[in-house]
Image: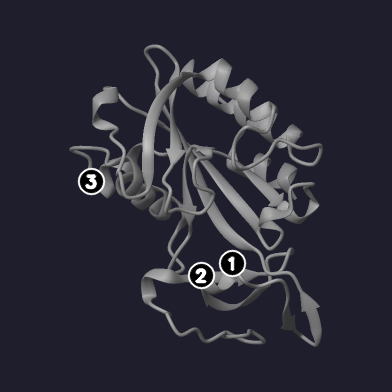
Amino acid sequence: MENSLIIPTKDYTNNEEILMFTEYRDPIGVISISDYNKLNTVEFKGMRVHPWIDYVTCFIIDPKDKKVAVQLRGQNEIDPGEFDLCSGHVRNNKLKNMAMSREMIEEDTMEGCSKLDILKKLIFVGKIKMDFSTLSDNRKNNLRTFVSVYAYKVKDKSIVKPNELSVQKISWVDLEDLKNAIRTSMFRFPYTEDTKEVYEKIFQNIDRMLENKLFIGIQEYEEFWK
């Protein structure tokens, strides 16, 4: 990778490998998840820059009653006890939808579903560019993420079961109540002045998807997101 920085780590494994980028998506290098969480800046082309990483998150929805699976994060996870949708890092330079399907099986079990089954039904609904250093709560001051957001419709809630190693509990929350909870920043990816317009487009996409209507396409969304 030209002009990139490869950062060694003692506990480096392929499963932990994530790519780092500049804010403008220039590739910087490779690092483990644990070491990324300790970083603030790295050197890139003679400058100190804050590294960004790719994240994924998913609204797992039962379309019959428009309820969404909400996690209470496990005590051994980052941000223990916080509310979250199924979320995670993009590892090993995988495609984002592949990373999302892996996280859904690892965290929410998705009983009876293979990764391929999930991939076929995942729907991209938007992206959020989230810089946690801008927040008053500086617990995540090193975290800067490009979050790809998906939706997934389930026919039966019973297939969604928490993996107790990473998730304490899964509750089914009304979609409108969930939107309002997100708007009051009760979730890991806060709703801020910088992100609210994007969030509202994501909510609009989900509503249209559930009504089987056309929604904002990826190309249009990419232009908006830039």
Q: Which residue is mark 1?
A: 37
Could you classify mark 1 by the number of other residues whose Cα lies within 10 Å: few (under 14), some (14-19), or many (20 or more)?
A: some
Disc assigned to residue 58: none
Identify the residue position indicated by label 2 in the image. Answer: 34
Residues tagged 2 and 1 counted as in contact (Cβ below 8 A): yes
Q: Which residue is mark 3?
A: 114
What amino acid is found at the position of numbered circle 1 in the picture?
Asn
Q: Residue at x 37, y 39 (%)?
A: 168
Q: Quadrant of residue 207?
A: top right
Q: CA distance from mark 2 to mark 1?
A: 5 Å
Say whether marks 3 and 1 touch (CB < 8 Å): no
Q: Mark 2 packing: few (<14 Cα in 10 Å), some, or many (20+)?
A: few
Residue 57: x and y in percent read: 50, 43
Is label 3 in a helix, a strand or a loop?
Answer: loop
What amino acid does circle 3 point to?
Ser
Residue at (63% x, 84% y) in the render: 4
How far apart are labels 2 and 3 at the CA level? 28 Å
Q: Which quarter of the figure is the N terminus placed in?
A: bottom right
In the image, residue 87 above or below residue 159: below
